[in-house]
Image (tube, helix red, strand yellow):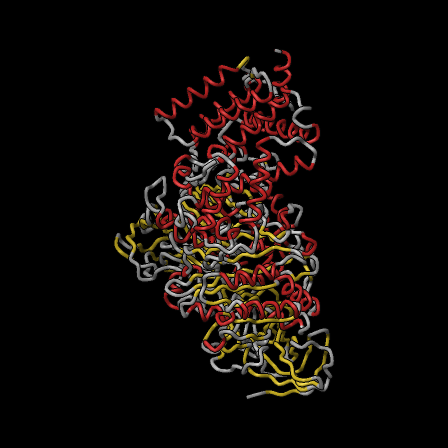
Amino acid sequence: MTVKGKVVGVYGNMISVEFDGNVQMNEVAYLVLGDKKLKSEVIRIRGKQAEMQIFEISKGIGIGNPVEFSAGLLSSTVGPGLLGQIYDGLQNPLPQLAEQCGFFLERGVYLDPLPGDKKWVFTPHAQPGDRLTRGEVLGSVPEGIFTHKIMVPFNLYASYTVKKIAPTGNYTIHDIIAELEDQQGNAVSVTMSFNWPVKRAVDAYAERLKPVDPLVTQIRIIDTLFPVCRGGTYCIPGPFGSGKTVLQQLISRYADIDIVIIAACGERAGEVVETLREFPGLPDPRTGRTLMERTIIICNTSSMPVAAREASVYTAVTLGEYYRQMGLNVLLLADSTSRWAQAMREMSGRLEEIPGEEAFPAYLESVIAAFYERSGIVRNKDGSIGSITIGGTISPAGGNFEEPVTQATLKVVGAFHGLSRERSDARRYPAIHPLESWSKYNGIVDRKKVKFARDVLFRSDEVAQMMKVVGEEGTSLDDFIAYLKGEFFDAVFLQQNAFDPVDASTPRERQHYVFEKLLQILVAVLEMSDKDDARSFFNQMRQKFLDWNGTEMNTDEFRSIETELMNMLRSREVEKLERIYNSQEQSGEGDAKNIQHHQRDIR
Amino acid sequence: MRKIYNTISEISGNVISVYAEGIKYGEMAEITSAHGKSLAEVIRLERDKVSLQVFAGGRGISTGDEVRFSSSPMKVSFSDDLMGRIFDGKGYPRDNGPRLSENLIEIGGPSVNPAKRIIPRNMIRTGIPMIDLFNTLVESQKLPIFSISGEPYNELLARIAMQAEVDLIILGGCGLKYDDYLFFKDTLEAGGSLSRSILFVHTAADPVVECLMVPDISLAVAEKFALKGKRILVLITDMTNFSDAMKEIAITMEQVPSNRGYPGDLYSQLAARYEKAVDFEGAGSITILAVTTMPGDDVTHPIPDNTGYITEGQFYLRHGRIEPFGSLSRLKQLVNAKTRDDHRALMDGMIKIYASYKETLEKRSMGFKMSAWDEKLLHYGVLFEDELMNLSVNIPLEKALDKGWEILAECFTPEETGFRTELLNRFWPKKEAS
């Protein structure tokens, strides 16, 4: 028997409901309003009154409206057919919704997330008599370029014997493909799809591993300086207009990953539209199929109901966890987690909870931590390795990173890509700040070399700060060269032209190769007559290097520019100091300074 | 059925509470007090206690006044008769014309399905070179004009209202000074643009709650016209007043403030309005330009800050000009490739040289000696500011581009400008005698 209740209060998107019987925390209920049923979720229970957040506009709700509790938690439907879909935060397929309702999002219309009539070619892997537990493989269907494993539903917690399994053939997601029996002899029928509560992490794997393999994004400043690992986490905070979304879009295109899930959470609809309209036409560099075939978009833009925004990131991560169980590598891009945190803040305010900093709820940090902890690389029960990498953007108020959401996120992520207004104003893209950002992961380049390269940047910045005070005249030539080296490194390697077909994405081998050459330039002790000479030398080198960045690797042109570059360098080079970053001993601070000292000694 | 109640149990600021039954969230009511009638909207229900925000404010309302519920949410009349008319924040006439009551539509309707949106593709010509040439306005774009008190932002809006090539202008005034309202009215009348405009004006003297209605009412009407195939430009001034009105109500309702007293949902509230900007496939479009005066010229203040995260770029209006630095139309790349071949190059090139001019100005103010190149830059800067940045200039894009080349040719030799040779060959003014 379903539990029923009635509305006794309405305040914004929060309703208070008096109920009879038992309700669960986070249970889904439907508010009956005329011929419509509006979805809502229990967020607090006090005695016989429950506070619920409603996932729709609350206009027109009155005292006494009936409420039907569903006895289930807010869940996602998983199964074949998820790839290529565009959902709202509650997993409503938006294109189908548009077919039914036209231009506007009508409230109270909920459609099936998965196509119910599509036939999938099922191949059984399990045999009658096999003993299986949750997450183990029953069979598979092809879904686009992937083999979609059909598993024992994660919500079946016992150990089961396979009684019957469907033979190879065409089935819909509603057809029964296996009959299982638990140890007590209870029979369970299994189809290809099932529901999983979004706010619970999927844990049907054998063990969780440590993320070690770098996830190559083909963005140089990330892969070389501030790498991300498969199964790791990173965040991109930045003020408005600093290019967060563009950076996420680039990563979604070029990252070396099986499946990308984009959670557009409380941001502009226009940006989602670009992805929505362009991805079906863009080829996936790895497979040649379109990018859309490996993408799921969860789209709850800023003007859509706030409560569903809170749900959208959980829906996204749940779908990711489902594919991870098949041994696939998933990248979840959440844009932006600040809007998600604000949704929590709104609800907390309505609940009249005691506010924490900037009125965010006191549990903000633990909720953010729990979300990022759903990332990870795991070994599944069949031995396959799957991962979810989570990358979240943050939109800090006033561009100030000292705010609660940024600070709470920095505690739990493995890499921090801080975007800066100065860099984006100077059109230095991607605007990741090379001095303030950090990563705890191992990248594709030896750490020592990376450290050396960063020292060059620090030194260059020091000189730049000094020059602001004493002017160019008051700066020594050696300092000036150190400054130019840093600027050069920034211009030719850290900055990347997203509109250039070649430069937009730099594969792993090329980054390795180019970085080695770059180091030779950075480490060289150079002979310069004066500052103008030095400046024009580096200008020429920069121009050449940028041309080099724009040519395909391993072409004749590539090799000839490389030779020219190296010849230019040799013509000025006095001594090589590669031992500085190759030496076995622990290299201390100020490697870049060492070069300068050498430079002075030689002269 | 209309329900009437005679006992008001609480009055606090602009919010009153009544014990009533069968009331819906968002429903409108009419309150009759000794000082006249006022509309009120239900903003909270707690069992039989109903809280309403009173449009005319709480002042003068007695506990014994009559509250008459209408059983329907806020609505506005929609028809072609709206054209050329001026209304207040409630949708009542301000221009002595007849009150319209047919074909009522709800305001603050649902959001557009993102799957139905399309990538913006058309520019809106305004005849203002700083917009058309350097930061092109695109149909369905939402842009704020960040400014400070005392700047001529209303003059700029009026100019855009008269010059923009759209079918219909809807002007929403939030907390306008009465003089400014008259200025808009007179300017549009004199310019002959009133007939293609609809004005919803809340003046600073009107009750603050009505201010909250202006954007919703303007955008609801815009949406209906857009669905009928019209290209609409919605101009709103000033969103800061709107946000402050929201703050006032939130504090009265004892909501926990988040940042400088503003409610935690400021972002969502602003986004719900700005996101109404849309290009309907197969129908019309809504473009939004909204003035946001930055308190203390501080862009990190919650209002401009949240706005910046929502909108697709921004115009900075400073010293009576649209600043070339910082101003950005994020969608311009989508349209300026197909206007004229020199558009993009000129847009970037001229601003780069203008940036050098600014550096030279700084050098000069520090007493450095001016080189021949500096002199050229100084000449260029003055011409650029007078002939392109000046907001009173009204020329089509093509003329503006030609003008740009003329200015360059007057100041520099072709090589000095750094443009690609191919462009110089095509566009550099030929018959320069000297």
- Asked if residue B98 can be seen in this view, the reply is yes
Disc count in the image?
0
Left or right for A378, reference A394: left
Q: Residue furthest front?
A: B433
Comparing A159 with A203, the one in front is: A203
Seen from the viewer's position, the closer of residues A339 and A66 is: A339
Q: Is residue A390 left or right of residue A553?
A: right
Identify the residue at horizontal 64%, vertical 14% (top origin): A600
Choose top left, top right, bottom left or bottom right for residue A603: top right
State whether residue A214 appears in this view: no
From the viewer's perspective, is A39 left or right of B362? left
Instruction: Please say if B175 is above or below B40.
Output: above
| Residue B220 drawn at (x, y percent) | 50, 70
Image quadrant occupied by the N terminus of chain B: bottom right
Which image quarter: residue A238?
Answer: top right
Question: Is residue A533 depicted above or below A381 in this figure?
Answer: above
How far across and how far down the image is residue B242, in percent?
A: 63, 65
Of A105 and B207, the residue lying toward us? B207
Q: Looking at the image, which residue sits at the far top? A: A602
x, y percentage for residue A231? 49, 41
Residue A490 in the image, given as x and y percentages of width and height:
54, 31
